Amino acid sequence: MYQISSTILEQEFNGLQAKKIVADENLEVLTISLENGSEFPEHTSPRDAFLVLLEGLIEFHINNKNFLLQKQQTFNFPAGVPHTVTAKMNSKFLIIR
């Protein structure tokens, strides 16, 4: 029932790495790592989402706007809107949707 995991800590910086760490009909949590200079290509979220930048620096591009996010900042964005994410340094973040 109770479980401690080191999934986020152990996730490598090797291009784009994504892993679902929680998934059910009401909630999905993904852990993403992006190596410096790597891009999460254009995609959409099936639900409104909340991003938590755990470490690093990323540029979030949505609706022809760029948002620079730093360690421990958060960002919310709507479902169905195309967006990309580029790592400006090795970065890890959570997507909660």
Image: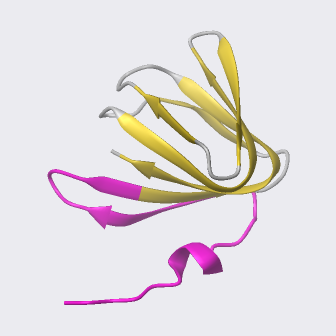
Q: Quadrant of the C terminus?
A: top left
Q: Could you say where residue 67 lies in the image, as x and y percent from the top left?
A: 68, 25
Q: Residue at x 70, y 51 (%)?
A: 71
Q: Is residue 81 left or right of residue 54?
A: left
| Residue 94 picture location, percent across and down | 50, 55
Q: Is residue 30 visible?
A: yes
Say if the magenta span includes residue 5: yes
Q: Residue at x 56, y 11 (%)?
A: 63
Instruction: Name the outermost residue toward the left.
Output: 25
Which contiguous range is marked in magenta? 1-29
| Colour pattern | secondary structure
Residue drawn at (66%, 36%) of the image: 85
The residue at 31%/65% (across/down) is 22
- Image x and y of residue 53, in percent: 61, 50
Tell whether position 95 is magenta: no
Q: Decide which of 16, 29 is in the foreground and name it.
A: 29
Counting from the top left corner in percent of width and height, residue 17 is at: 62, 60
Residue 46, compared with residue 72, is above or below; it is: above
Specify the quadrant that holds the N terminus. bottom left
- Residue 16 can be seen in this image: no
The front one of 31 and 39 is: 31
- Residue furthest out toward the top: 64
* 73 relative to 8, above or below: above
Relative vertical location of residue 43 with respect to residue 73 in this rendering, above or below: above
Count the numbered circles shown: 0
